[in-house]
Image (cartoon, rainbow, N blue to C red):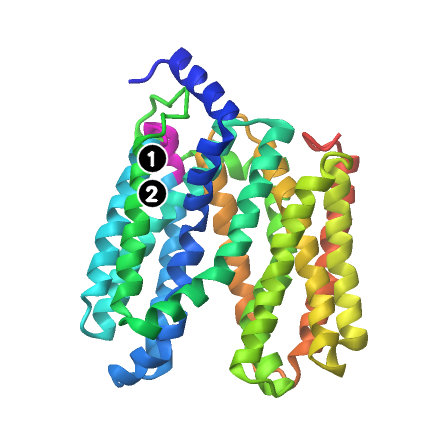
């Protein structure tokens, strides 16, 4: 067992060696997007090869997300009980084995089953990596690290489908999963070279560690911040699900041109996160969040006013919304973690689980049989922006921890 003093000294070294710390945290953060988006270009060919409808093949995505979301809830308490390294190593080992099995799948049910196993392993990376940032960093320094990782999170969805497409140009779809297995091996090597970051593990039995979610649910400031931040992402997930119908069916663009507009929107998230890094030196975190939430509201207004006039008249307000989310998300995540003094792993897992759950609701809602999705998306952004902005003002007036 690691001593408290030794781990505290290790964390001080990690703080001073960002060039060694940040790449691993960034890699762990990118696992979900790389695991889901790399396979997207292969979905139509898999449906044709196995003579299955797209609705069946898409289960390799749906089942991954569902399993991933629920698995998050287990890794948090486990990492609080046993430390960060051992659950990470176990999760990454499962991920590597499942990726190899996916590469050798011979039919759709096999691939769906192996993807469920892959998701269970991948869930260790994002929840525990966020908890590690709380172990190592604090206050404004942690906010900077979250902003750096947010840039990676925005970059990964842009790179992953392109990388998958390049692989399919010269190789078979199986190579996508083999490369994901290699990515998992790199992650394990990084974790093995990384010291334990949790200085004080709990001595409670694991069955009682799950009670940490009960403590979090009775932490009003934590729950309020989680709901506010999750609701702010509702328009983005709605856009992801409805974007192809809007650009291809609505504006008549080709699939290739649609991919450019989708990448343009992903760029907005990255630029917003990078701007957060620069602006946080002169603007308070609370002000950045206020600006970000106001930007979501204004983007919704502009979509309702001009969004139906053409692809760029829709893309530019959507860029504002996504940029605003990129600007506000790093300090938002930091404020959420500020509300807990222990159970950081559980707090991180529950936060990401809420992101995914409410995001899935947004995807379902925009996918309903709307005659025109643009005004629906504009109304979603306007409503969520207004509600989140109002809730944030109320929380500030009540003096929520860290908002001063």
Q: Position of residue 234 (x, y in %)?
A: 61, 60
Q: Position of residue 152 (x, y in %)?
A: 52, 49
Observer-nearest residue: 218 or 306? 306
Q: How many marks?
A: 2
Q: Position of residue 199 (x, y in %)?
A: 41, 20
The residue under the point 35% across, 74% down is 169
The residue under the point 70% across, 41% down is 278
Q: Is residue 134 left or right of residue 3?
A: right
274 drawn magenta: no
81 drawn magenta: yes
In the rendered view, tell whether residue 290 sits above or below residue 20: below
Please say whether residue 328 is visible from this viewpoint.
no
Q: Are marks 2 and 1 in contact (CB under 8 Å)?
A: yes
- Cα separation, mark 2 vs mark 1, equals 6 Å
Q: Quadrant of the C terminus?
A: top right
In the rendered view, tell whether residue 150 sits above or below residue 131: below
Quadrant of the image occupied by residue 52: bottom left
Q: Secondary structure at mark 1?
A: helix
Q: Residue furthest front?
A: 170
In the rendered view, tell whether residue 340 sits above or below residue 25: above
Q: Secondary structure at mark 2?
A: helix
Please say whether residue 260 is visible from this viewpoint.
yes
Q: Is residue 322 left or right of residue 134?
A: right
Quadrant of the image occupied by residue 374: bottom right
Please state the extent of the stretch shown in magenta in the rendering: 76-84
Residue to which mark 2 is pinned: 187
The residue under the point 58% across, 74% down is 243
Q: Residue furthest top?
A: 5
Q: Quadrant of the N terminus?
A: top left
Residue to which mark 1 is pinned: 191
């Amino acid at each position: 067992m690691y001593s408290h003093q030794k781990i505290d000294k290790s964390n001080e070294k990690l703080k001073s060696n960002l060039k060694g710390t940040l790449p691993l945290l960034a890699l762990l953060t990118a696992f979900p997007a790389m695991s889901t988006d790399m396979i997207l270009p292969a979905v139509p060919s898999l449906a044709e090869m196995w003579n299955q409808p797209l609705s069946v093949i898409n289960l390799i995505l749906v089942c991954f997300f569902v399993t991933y979301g629920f698995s998050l809830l287990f890794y948090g308490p486990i990492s609080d009980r046993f430390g960060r390294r051992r659950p990470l190593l176990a999760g990454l080992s499962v991920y590597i084995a499942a990726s190899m099995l996916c590469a050798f799948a011979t039919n759709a049910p096999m691939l769906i089953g192996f993807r469920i196993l892959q998701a269970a392993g991948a869930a260790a990376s994002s929840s525990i990596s966020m908890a590690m940032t709380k172990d190592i960093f604090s206050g404004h320094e942690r906010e900077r690290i979250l902003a750096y990782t947010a840039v990676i999170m925005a970059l990964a969805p842009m790179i992953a489908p392109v990388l998958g497409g390049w692989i399919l140009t010269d190789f078979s779809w199986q190579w996508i999963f083999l490369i994901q297995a290699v990515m998992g091996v790199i992650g394990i090597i990084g974790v093995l070279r990384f010291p334990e970051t949790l200085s004080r593990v709990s001595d409670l039995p694991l069955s009682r560690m799950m009670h940490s979610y009960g403590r979090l649910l009775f932490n009003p400031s934590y729950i309020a911040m989680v709901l506010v931040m999750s609701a702010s992402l509702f328009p983005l997930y709605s856009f992801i699900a409805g974007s192809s119908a809007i650009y291809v069916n609505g504006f008549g663009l080709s699939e290739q041109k649609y991919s450019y507009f989708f990448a343009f929107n992903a760029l907005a998230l990255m630029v917003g996160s990078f701007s957060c890094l620069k602006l946080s030196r002169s603007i308070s975190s609370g002000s950045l969040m206020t600006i970000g939430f106001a930007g979501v509201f204004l983007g919704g207004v502009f979509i309702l006013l001009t969004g139906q006039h053409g692809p760029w008249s829709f893309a530019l307000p959507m860029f504002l919304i996504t940029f605003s989310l990129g600007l506000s998300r790093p300090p938002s995540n930091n404020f959420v973690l500020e509300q807990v003094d222990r159970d950081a792993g559980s707090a991180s897992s529950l936060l990401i689980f809420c992101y995914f759950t409410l995001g899935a609701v947004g995807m379902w809602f925009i996918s309903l049989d709307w005659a025109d999705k643009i005004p629906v998306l504009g109304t979603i952004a306007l409503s969520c922006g207004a509600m989140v902005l109002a809730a944030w003002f109320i929380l500030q007036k009540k003096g929520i921890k860290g908002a001063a």
